[in-house]
Image (spheres, grey):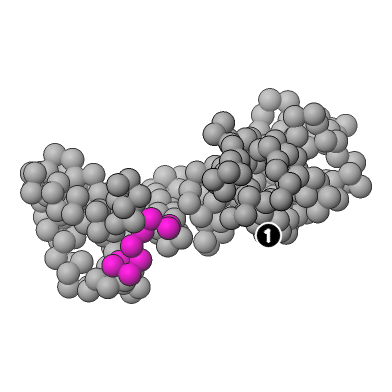
Amino acid sequence: MEQKRPVDIFHEALDYLWNGLDLEEKGWKRLKKGDFKKRMKNGLTYHIWFDRSRYNYIDYEIGHGNVEVGFTCIIKQGDDWLYSFKIEPTTGGSFFRMLTEDLRLDTGLLDTFLPLIKAHYLDFIDHFEVDPTEALQLVCAPFTEAEDYSWFIHVREQMVERYGMAEQLAEYRRQTELRGTPEQKVRHWMGKQIFYFSHGSDVNHAWAASRTVDKLDAIVERFMMAKKRYDTWNEEDEAAYQLYLQEQDIEKRTYRTWYLIANPRNLPKEFVQQELEFRFKLFSERKKEKK
């Protein structure tokens, strides 16, 4: 097997994306450090920006390596980021592992990127150049996310101010206020947590799925009463509790339980101990790895 350096894998990944997205035909430039860029006469800059992990290495003797790359697709005007599109790893964070188990470039992973970048970035640009107001209609909110949290679009208010209509700007600001409510905050962060836990290799999925509603209710209600007694129960906790009650999937209900009992600050030691026991069972694989 040909032995390669992390930088070789990085450039293979860039080549794959460059060719798969036909960027050269679209008039984009490939920069020396690996980024892709296209500048327009109207002052807009389209940019696909790459970031390499500082911990990249490949050791062929032991058959292990770590080559991770993160990237962001952005639209800029001067120093202002107007629009960004990002894809998120199922493990959270910003980087994707670019290696297969046999230390080759994971082209299967890159194949999942291509249609998403095309649909939510390149096609958006094409639409935006023809009719900015109409293009913004579909993303006229601070954040647009996939149901499974595998990607998200972030639109800045400056973009809607410069290219949208008054009605769109009003809707954008309404969405901004809505996103700041306890219900929406909890729905967002609890949803992300459930997504990551559902895909997490260090989560004991069998244990999470084997809980019963009665057992989970007993834990949650005990913490809820304690937090109310010690005046640490807030509006976001209440919103999270309502979502917990609505959850029918037992494994996800276990994750929602963890959300409600995690970080039991200002509670007696017995609650801290109960939270630790729950954590060690939910993340039993993580505990094994540390040993």
Q: Is the residue 95 above or below the residue 211 in the image?
A: above
Residue 25 at x, y percent in the picture: 91, 47
Left or right: 164 with respect to 265?
Answer: right
Q: Residue at x 35, y 66 (%)?
A: 205
User: In this rendering, does residue 136 appear at all?
Assistant: yes
Q: Is the residue 203 above or below the residue 69 in the image?
A: below
Q: Which one is nearer the viewer's eye here, 69 or 12? A: 12
Q: Report which quarter residue 7 is drawn in.
A: top right
Q: Is residue 206 rendered magenta in the image?
A: yes
Q: What's drawn in magenta, residue-wise?
A: 200-208
Q: Residue at x 12, y 43 (%)?
A: 267
Residue 10 at x, y percent in the picture: 70, 40
Left or right: 39 with respect to 95?
Answer: right
Q: Report which quarter residue 269 is drawn in.
A: top left
Describe the element under mark 1 as helix, strand or loop: helix
Q: Residue at x 34, y 56 (%)?
A: 285
Residue 39 at x, y percent in the picture: 83, 33
Q: Which one is nearer the viewer's eye here, 68 or 188? A: 68
What residue would you read off at disc 1?
A: 108
Q: Is the residue 254 above or below the residue 131 in the image?
A: below
Residue 142 at x, y percent in the picture: 56, 45
Q: Residue at x 80, y 29 (%)?
A: 32
Q: Is residue 136 rendered magenta in the image?
A: no
Q: Report which quarter residue 204 is drawn in.
A: bottom left
Seen as rendered, the residue at the extreme top is 79
Q: Residues within 10 Å of mark 1 (few under 14, many from 20)?
A: few
Q: Which one is nearer the viewer's eye here, 127 or 63? A: 63
Looking at numbered disc 1 in the image, what kind of residue is underneath it? Gly
